[in-house]
Image (cartoon, rainbow, N blue to C red):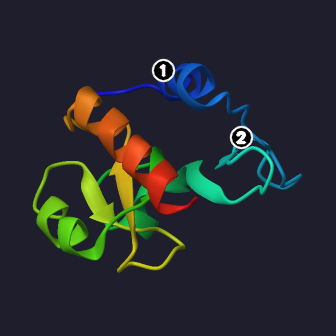
Amino acid sequence: MIEREEILAYVKEKFDTEPDYPWFKYPSYAVLRHKGGGKWYGLIMNVPRIKLGLTGEGSAEILDLKCDPELNSLLRSEQGILPAYHMNKKHWITIVLNSSFNKEETYNLINLSYDLTK
């Protein structure tokens, strides 16, 4: 399990990334961008669980990351990994932040997404 604050602290230290909050309607949606070019490598959102195909009421906090298509198909069998929400499902994945998905693996996938979007 990983928290939003841990992700934001990690990307600040590793890539000197400050989150961008571009949508007035969704003030908690945080875009993670490369410095300079501004390309996205991650997106943190709160999405209704029903839209993600998850059971239960309310919303789930998620992290969308770019991912190699071959790795993407392998990861989808992991608890807490879903097809990308609102992104290309072949090249992006969604990690449910309050799931049991490993924190270190999340950091590795953030690094991969950063490298894939250079």
Q: CA distance from mark 2 to mark 1?
A: 15 Å
Asked if residue 31 lies left or right of residue 7, the reply is right
Q: Is residue 78 above or below residue 101?
A: below
Residue 54 in view, yes or no: no
Q: Is residue 70 left or right of residue 106?
A: left
Determine the secondary structure under disc 1.
helix
For the C terminus, the image quarter is bottom right
The number of callouts visible is 2
Name the secondary structure under disc 2: loop
Is residue 40 left or right of 98 when viewed as pictured? Answer: right
Residue identifier under label 2: 28
Residue type at mark 2: give it. Answer: Ser
Residue at the disc numbered 1: 6
Residue at screen point 80% across, 49% down: 36
User: Horizontally, is 81 left or right of 27 in the view?
Assistant: left
Q: Do the residues bearing badges 2 and 1 touch, measured as CB atoms within 8 Å?
A: no
Tell me the crowding category of disc 2: few under 14, some 14 to 19, or many 20 or more residues within 10 angstroms, Cα based. some
Residue 39 seen in this snapshot = yes
The N terminus appears in which quarter of the rendering? Answer: top left
Position in image of residue 95 (x %, y %): 35, 50
